[in-house]
């Protein structure tokens, strides 16, 4: 099998083989299941991180107000949040 510039012809040539048909079917199933499971498993972690983001900025601003690097304020908040 040689590839051409035309991707449509290449796809038709690849789909002539049964193992490629099964690979595309399996890839489609995995993509759909991954999208469905990601909303249930991964999204809550992103939501929790986004909810804590304003608090991180607050601690960084508080560190700047007392004359310390904002990184130290962020580190303080992270250590305090992990304990609780």
Image (tube, rainbow, N blue to C red):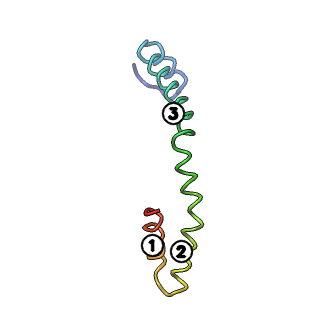
Residue 61 position (above or below residue 78): below
For the residues bearing labels 2 and 1, Cβ distance under 8 angstroms:
yes
Q: Residue 4: horizontal and vertical position, in percent? A: 47, 26
Point 56% across, 45% down: residue: 43
Q: Which mark is residue 65?
A: none
The residue shown at (60%, 66%) is 54
Q: In the rendering, which numbered label is found on residue 34?
A: 3
Q: Earlier in the sequence, mark 3 or mark 1?
A: 3
**Mark 3 or mark 1, whichever is nearer to me:** 1
Measured from the top left, where is residue 40 in percent x and y?
56, 38
Above or below 46: residue 56: below
What's the CA distance linking mark 2 and mark 3? 36 Å
Alpha-carbon span between mark 2 and mark 1: 8 Å
Residue sitting nearer the eye, 36 or 14 = 36
Where's residue 23, x and y in %?
44, 21
Q: Which residue is mark 2?
A: 59
Q: Earlier in the sequence, mark 2 or mark 3?
A: 3
The location of residue 27, given as percent across then percent down, is 48, 26
């Amino acid at each position: 099998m040689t590839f051409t510039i035309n991707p449509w012809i290449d796809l038709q040539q690849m789909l002539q083989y049964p193992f490629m048909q099964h690979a595309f079917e399996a890839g489609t199933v995995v993509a759909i299941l991954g999208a469905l499971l990601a909303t249930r498993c991964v999204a809550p972690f992103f939501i929790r991180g986004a909810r804590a983001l304003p608090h991180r900025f607050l601690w960084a601003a508080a560190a700047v107000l007392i004359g310390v690097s904002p990184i130290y304020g962020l580190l303080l908040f992270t250590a305090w949040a992990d304990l609780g």
